[in-house]
Image: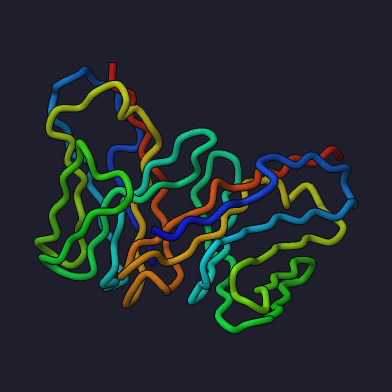
C-alpha cells in the first residue's frame, strides 16, 4: 500500500531533550516536506527536500533540522526542543516537485513540557 | 513572499445548505491546490487548478480559478455530514515552497 509513515504518532517530552521524528515513503517520491499545524495558523512548512541531499527552508525552520540521505526517508530533528514547538507535525511527499499532489502522513503530536 | 488569505475561518451550516470558501492572493499564481482534512485526520489532496478561469467539478464540489489567477473558490452544493472538516488551499511560493491558507473549518448541523 502506498503510504507516508511517521513515527512516533504521539510524544510527550521535556525541554532540551533531543528528539527525532521519522518519515518514510514507499512511493519513490522526489519531493518531501515537513509541516506544523497550529490552531488558527493552518499548515506551515518547516523544511522541504527536492531530492537526496537537497533540502531547503520553509517558512518556519528555526529550531529544526532535517536530512535526506536516502530518497525514502526525511527525518525531522529537534536538537533542543522548547515548549513553543508543541504542535501537530505532518510529513508529506509527492512525485517531482511541489506542484504535484501532496501525500500526507498521519501526523505526529508533540508535547514539549 | 507570496501569501494566500483564506476566508472564512469557520462556517457552520445546516445539512443541505451550500458552502463556499475563498482563497485570495495579491500576486498571480501559477496554480492552486485544494485539500480536505477530516477531524483527527491528515490533509487529503482534492484537486489542482492551473488555467485562468478554470472550473472543475467533483460530484457536489465545484472548484474555480479566477480569470486573473489571483483567487480561487471551493463550493459545496447541498452539504452532507461527510463534508465536515477543514478545507485548505495551497500555493507555490518561490522555487518550491508550498504555502497553505489558514483553512476554513466546516461544521454541519444534521
Residue A30 percent coordinates (x, y): 26, 72
Q: Is residue B45 left or right of residue B54?
A: left
Q: Is residue A8 left or right of residue A69?
A: right
**Residue sitting at the far bottom:** B51
Q: Residue at x 55, y 73 (%)?
A: B48
Above-or-below relation of A89 to B35: above
Q: Indicate the colouring scheme.
A: rainbow
- Give the side of residue B86 with respect to residue B78, left or right: left
Q: Left of A101 or right of it: where is A27? A: left
At 29% across and 21% down in the image, what residue appears?
A83
Image x and y of residue A39, in percent:
51, 33
| Residue that appears at 46% across and 35% down | A38
Give the position of the N terminus of chain B as an image quadrant: bottom left
Q: Name the residue rendered at 38%, 66% in the picture.
A: A2
Q: Residue B66 occupies which quadrant of the picture?
A: bottom right
Name above or below for residue A88 compared with residue A30.
above
B51 and A77: which is toward the camera: B51
User: What is the number of callouts on the image?
Assistant: 0
The quadrant of the image that shows the C terminus of chain B is top right
From what the image shows, is residue A109 above or below residue A103? above
Please tell me which residue lies in front, B36 or B103: B103
Image quadrant in which you'd find residue B109: top right
Residue A59 % position (x, y): 33, 49
Amino acid at each position: 500500500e502506498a503510504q507516508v509513515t511517521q513515527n512516533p504518532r504521539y510524544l510527550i517530552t521535556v525541554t532540551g531533550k533531543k528528539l527525532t521524528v521519522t518519515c518514510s515513503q514507499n512511493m519513490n517520491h522526489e519531493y518531501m516536506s515537513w509541516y506544523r499545524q497550529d490552531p488558527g495558523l493552518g499548515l506551515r512548512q518547516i523544511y522541504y527536500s527536492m531530492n537526496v541531499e537537497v533540502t531547503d527552508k520553509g517558512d518556519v525552520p528555526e529550531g529544526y533540522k532535517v536530512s535526506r540521505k536516502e530518497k525514502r526517508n526525511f527525518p525531522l530533528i529537534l536538537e533542543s526542543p522548547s515548549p513553543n514547538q508543541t504542535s501537530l507535525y505532518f510529513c508529506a511527499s509527492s512525485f517531482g516537485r511541489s506542484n504535484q499532489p501532496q501525500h500526507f502522513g498521519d501526523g505526529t503530536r508533540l508535547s514539549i513540557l | 513572499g507570496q501569501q494566500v488569505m483564506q476566508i472564512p475561518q469557520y462556517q457552520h451550516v445546516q445539512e443541505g445548505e451550500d458552502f463556499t470558501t475563498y482563497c485570495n492572493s495579491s500576486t498571480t499564481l501559477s496554480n492552486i491546490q485544494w485539500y480536505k482534512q477530516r477531524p483527527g485526520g491528515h490533509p487529503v489532496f482534492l484537486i489542482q487548478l492551473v488555467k485562468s478561469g478554470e472550473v472543475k467539478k467533483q460530484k457536489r464540489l465545484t472548484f474555480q480559478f479566477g480569470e486573473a489567477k489571483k483567487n480561487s473558490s471551493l463550493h459545496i452544493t447541498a452539504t452532507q455530514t461527510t463534508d465536515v472538516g477543514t478545507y485548505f488551499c495551497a500555493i507555490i511560493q518561490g522555487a518550491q515552497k508550498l504555502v497553505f491558507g489558514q483553512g476554513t473549518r466546516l461544521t454541519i448541523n444534521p
